[in-house]
Every structure is written in C-alpha cells, then in structure tokens.
Image (tube, coloured by chain):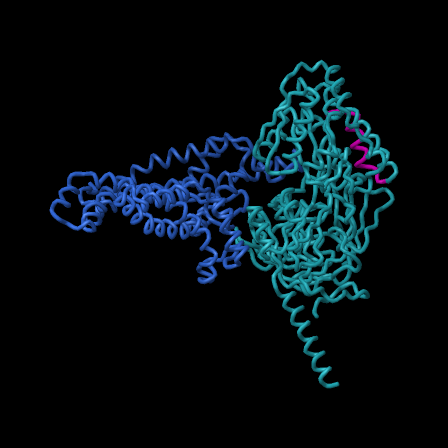
Chain colours: A blue, B cyan
Amino acid sequence: MLRFALTRIVMAVPTLLIVAVSVFVLIRLIPGDPASLMLGDLATPASLADLRTRLGLDQSLPVQFAIWFGNLLRGDFGVSINSQEPILPLIVSRFWISAQIVLVAVLLASLAAVPAGVVAAWKQDASLDIGLVALATLLLSIPTFWLGLLLLLFFGLKLGWLPVVGYVSIGDDPWRGVLYLVMPVTTLFLHEIGVLLRMARASTLEVLRLDYITHARAKGLSETAVLWRHAFRNAFGPTWTLIGLVLGNLLGGIAVVETVFTIPGLGRLLVDSIFARDYPVIQGCLLFVALTYVLVNLVIDLCYPIFDPRVTAQ
Amino acid sequence: MRNRLTIASVLASGALAAWSAAVAAPLRIQVPADIRSLDPGVNRDNNTDGVVLHMVEGLVAYGEDATPKPLLAERVDVSPDGLSYTFRLRRGVKFHNGADLTSADVLWSWNRYMDPRTDWRCLSDFDGRGSVKVTSVTAPDAASVVFSLEKPTALFLTALSRTDCGMTGILHRDSVRADGSFDRPVGTGPFKFGAWKRGEFVRLDRFADYAALPGKRDGYTGAKRPLVDEVRFLVVPDPATARTGVMSGAIDIMPDLDSSAMTELKDDKRADLSVIPNMGLVGLIMQTRDPVLGNVTLRRAVAAAIDKPEIVAAATEGFGKPNGSVVPTLSSYHGKVQDEDIAYDPAAARALVAASGYRGETIVMLATKRYPSSFNTAVVSQQMLRAVGLKVEIEVLEWATQLDRYAKGTYQMQAFPYSGRMDPSLSYETIAGPKDRQPRKLWDDPGVQALVDRSMVVSERAERQAIFDALHRRFLADVPMVMLFNGIASGAAGAEVRGYASSPTALPRLWEVSRAPAPPPADPKGPTCSVSP
C-alpha cells in the first residue's frame, strides 16, 4: 500500500509541473495588466513604469518564470501583488474555510444520497423511485447561486433565523460560526445530493441485475440482506469514486457559494485574484488545487479495498 | 411631584440608554472587495481609499464642490509668484496616539512619501515628472510648513487633495516599524484603526479626541464628527446579498449601488437612498486613428445620433442628467458654455453618415458588465447608431481586458467610465495628448495640448474659465468622445441610520453619521466636539 501511495505521489509530479507551466503561461495570455488595474484610468506613464518595476513585471517572461519556479522549489509561493501577503499561508487559511463547508456538505449528502439511491434502485419504477429521481434531477438542475439566494431571502430575510452576511470562524465563536455555515452547507448539500443519488441508484441497478444477486435470492436470503450485504458493497465503488471527484472539485473552489454567502474561502480568493490579475496568487491557488485533487483521489483509491475486497492497492 | 420627577428621570435614563446603545452598536458598511493595505496612497484602490481616509487627513481636502479646502491647515498662503505655498496648521489637532500635530510631522510624512522606497503612487506627480515639482519643503516654526515649487501651477492643492494619493495624509512616525516598514495608520482622522481580518472586515474605532472643524460636512473637509463608537467595513462581494443585508438590517450602509439596486430600493421603506452626480465621466470614446472613425464627419454623425436624455435615463434608471462636457456638472467651472452640446438629430446624423463616405463597415464597441451604467449605455447607443445606418456591434469584455485595450489604444469605440477628476485641467489632460507616446489618449492635437498645459499653469479664475470654454468648443467640433453624463454616486442606508450622504468622490463617509435616536447637537462654539451623551 505504501509503495502504491508513493508511486502515485511521484506520478503526480509531472502533472503538477505541467499545471505550473500552463498556469504561468495561460494567465499571461489573458489581456490585462496588474499594474494598470491597480492604477486604473488615472495611471500616468511614469507611475505605471514605477509600479511595473516594483512588481517585477518589467522583466522578461522567462526570467519571471525562473524566479517564481525557483522560489516554488524552495516552498516559497511568493507574495500577493494585491495584498502583499505571503501566498502559502493565505491559501492554507482560505482552504480550511472552504474545506469545512465542503467536507460537511459532502458527508451529509453522501449519508443521505447513497441509501436513498440504493432504495430507489430496489424500488425501481415504483412511485418512491420516481419521486426520488425527480427530486434528484430538480436539485441538480437548480443553480447553486439561485438556491443560495432563495435560502438567504427565506431563512435570512423573511424568517430572520440565520445571518445574511458576514463570516465568523468556528474557532473564534463555535455557535455563531456554525450559524454562518448553515446556509452555505445546505446549498452545497442540496446540490450534491442530486449528483450522488443518481449515481448510487444507477450503480445499484447495474449490480441488482447480476447473477450472484439472483443466486443470493435463490438461496432464500431476505431482500434486506441481499440489498445491503451483497448489492450495496459491490455497487458502492462507482459512487465512492464520484464522491472523490466531487470532493476534489469542490475543495478546489466553491466560488459561487462563497460569493453569495460572503465566505472568505479559496474559491473567492481565486476569482478575486483573476479579476485583479494577481498572478502569483492565481498560480499558487491553481497549483494548490491540483495538488489537493491528486491527494483526495489518492485517498479515495487507497480506501477502495475497504469497500471492495476484489480491489487491492497493488 | 416626586412621581413626575421619577417618571421623567426614568424616561431620561431610558433615552440615554437608547442613545448609548445606538452609539455603541457598530455601523456596518458593505465593501465589495477586501482592501489592499492600510498605507495611504500606496497599495490602494477605491475600496482602500474609502476605508483609509477615515483614519488619515491631509493639509487640504476636496470640498463638496470638488475644490481643495483647508483641513489640517488653518489656511494656505500662496506667494504672488505662485512658487511658494505656506500652510498654517490648525492648533489642537491630535494624532490617534495622543501626540500633537506639528510641522515636523508634516515634514516627516512628506519625506516618507517622496522616498521611492515608499512606493507612493503619486510620487511622479510631485517630483517633476508630472505637472508639479516640489523643490523644497521647510518648517519655519512648529505650526507652519512651506512648500516651494519649481514653477507655478494651478493644480498643486488639487494634487495634494487627491483621494487616490491618500489625500497626502499626514501620519505620525509611529505608523512605521523600527525597520521603516509600514505598520498601521496613526493619523488624525475621526476614526482610528481597530482590526483588519483579511477577507472579512476592517474595524475602525471612534477617535474621542478628534479635532472637528465647525460647520457642516463639506466633501472631505468641514464637520467630521465620529458619532458611533465603531464602524465595520464588511466584505460582501455579491450585490444581491448586500441588498438583502440592507433589507434585513445586517448591513447599515451600501455605499455604491448599481442601477438595478437603486430601482429596487428606491421605494423600499427599509432603506434611504442618497443619489448625487459624482465627478466621473461616462461616454463613448472613439479611436481617431481608426480607418473608419478617423473621419471627423462620421464622429459628428455618431454624436448627432445619440439621444442623450433617453440614453442617460435608461443607463441610470432616471437618476442621471446629461452632460456633454468633460467638465463635470458639480465643478465650479461648469458654466453656460459647457451646457452647449451637439443636438440629437437623426436626420442630420444620417446626412453626415452619407457625407462621410461610410460604406457599411462594422464598428465594434467595447463594453463591460463591471459597470452596469456603462454597459447599459453601450446597449442603448448601439440601437441609436444602428437607426442612422451605422453597423455597430458590441463586444463585451471583462474590465481588466477593456482597460488594457484602452491603455493600448486598440479599439474603435468604447462605452467607457472614467473615474473622477477634480479639476477640469485633469479631465482634459486625461483625454488630450500625444498618442505616439501615450496610446490611451483620445485627442491628439498640439493646439489643444497647448491650451491644456496653459490651464495647468494659470491660477487666475477668469483666464482658466476662458481656456475651458475654448476647449469645450473644440471638443464639440473634433468629437474625440461623445460625453454623455457624470457618474452617479448612490448609496443606501438602513432605516435606523441618520445623516448618511453619498459623496462626490463616490467614497463612503461615515463621519456625521449616527443611528437613531439622533445625536445631541454639536457645540457651536468650539472647534472640537464631544459625542458623549
């Protein structure tokens, strides 16, 4: 298992290298200049030249890349053009804010969607199945920003139960911190439940048609035993993979949800940095996201044997 | 009798408690993005200026009419040759650390700004690369500072007052650490720095020893009493969320509304709107070196095709007023000549199109959704231009890209929002100049440039007005741009907020702002004020 994990990590190095080069080049292909943006239409040629020199933007692209990549190899992600903050601590602090929302939402969505998907498959074409599939499709179809705004209007404005704007860290004030997270977590939860329920249902349906399920039934096992002992464990693999992909995607940024609920997470940092052409932060965020994606999927792969003994980590 | 006294004292103490609670509750203001730094005029944007200028003040500041007026200076004496400015400092002004303001602080602050290591964004405006060169600054006594200039200029005080320069704010040396790096602003403003939680909020606390000027609020000078104990700038990027916050009471002030928010909130009893024109300029800029729009007859056709009242009503939801001059309507230099404009005349526009030799070439107009009024302007103008036979397409760009195209001059036409220029010379300087050296310039005409340069030197008002009048008439003849209207500064304050008014700079002002119940009246005698109940 250790060798497998190490191999996967080593294999991730070229991926990250490609990400680093691509991000560096692509972000500079987009028109727009951070110095010009910072000074706006009031810029004079002299002030623009001063700022470009200070930001190191007057150097050639290969020199800029060499400096950035050299620092990166030493673990130095650089300093934000916008805020002058060191980038790695900035990314990590924002990542934890996003992660607490994503992890809770995906955990809750998995706990609700997987059993519901299995039950829907078991009751295929019954009204329960049709109802669950319709609900999943509906939830999947609603854009998260709209769902978020609806929750804000109803629970924040109309009922006044939950705070509308702002953010309080759970570390600073656990109770208020949780209150601020309820709506963003609910928004993500409702969206992801649709994705996972459909996958759990489809993969269970596939397994329920296999011969060994017929065999189990022929042995006289109860439907519950057939479903949970034989069908579920074999059907869970694809859903588990999807959970990994969903986690990797969401941990990389939930900018829309963070913007609607004023959560200072990683997604918002990335989007703000793109608008401000804060090159070092964009590069740092995307590298960090790529690394997170690789690690999450590695963990998912390593957990596979727990659910499906046929799979080994060799 | 005793019962009456008891009731009266209970009522009085209740009112006192209500007033104390109102003062103590933080005033929450939405900002769409986090600030960049606390260092005035260094690493900044409009959000940053809006926060920092509550903590620092300059010798002079813009008044409501966009002219520079004394703030930390009691008065400014200009020598007859215009080469020497003597600032007499107000007495009794204290820094947030309790120290008295002296000329030594002004000298220290100035030297810090002029040190290239500070990265002050306005360094090039004062070291001779711009319109001003300060040759020396001296302090003959503790209450006087003398600035000497290389040559006379009409823009020195305007440049010192600029909000993007941090109002050339006077800081105490405790603002920097032992190694010279900036720590936090220890200024003289009505609020002092409290806390900054990045990505979340900035908290400012009331400066109890603030030396307020008597009189009324006047732009960034005049009365500036801090009437609440704490103000909190909350980072709320999504305007829809911010609007919900104002309606629910979670946000007290939303200082910059877009047109749809204005429409939504104008009839809502939970919010009060404050809408005024600001110094920004919104118009259609044209590339005079473009093969199609290089033709002045065609540019005149564009101007005649635009129904400004209709376009302004549509772009600003009825809150704006047309202005055909780059001299803003708020400016004291906006007179009858500046009201002259090219009349809306579709028939004349069609005739001009025909006379120009236009052969149906596509004209691409750049626009951005970042500034809704500018985007709406593009959409409505496109229809008006099509109505006179011009084939105009809109290309929607993200703001950074549009700004880049503007700076490089690589466009045909843009619906473009300029930020405010406080002096007409600066408005004209923005658009006029040599395109070879500065591609962002719209109007490359040596004669015009000479007039603009002259307007920056003379300080006699009548002569300046004559220059601006001449420039406006040439502007209408050459049409490098169709000026449409000045920007709108529009803010919304919750029903409990008292005294909030939008400013001509479009930055929020939280002095003289309180919560209900209303604050006790200011002491009319003294220059300082107390807000204790």
Quarter holding the N terminus of chain B is: bottom right
Q: Position of residue B259 (x, y in %)?
A: 65, 42
Residue B456 falls within the magenta-colored stretch: yes
Q: Residue furthest left?
A: A219
Front residue of B450/A196: it is A196
Question: On the rendered structure, is A121 left or right of A44?
Answer: left
Magenta stretch: dominant SS?
helix
Q: Position of residue A275 (x, y in %)?
A: 54, 39
Question: On the rendered structure, is B130 left or right of A222?
Answer: right
Q: Residue at the location (50% across, 32% down)?
A: A28
Camera sees residue B54: yes
Task: Place residue B434 in its image quadrant.
Answer: top right
Front residue of A232/A309: it is A232
Question: On the rendered structure, is A60 left or right of B118?
Answer: left
Q: Residue at the location (63% across, 54% down)?
A: B253
Residue B514 falls within the magenta-colored stretch: no
Front residue of B320/B450: it is B320
Which stretch did the figure color magenta? B443-459
Task: Place residue B354 in its image quadrant.
Answer: top right
Name above or below for residue A95 compared with residue A55: below
Camera sees residue A74: no
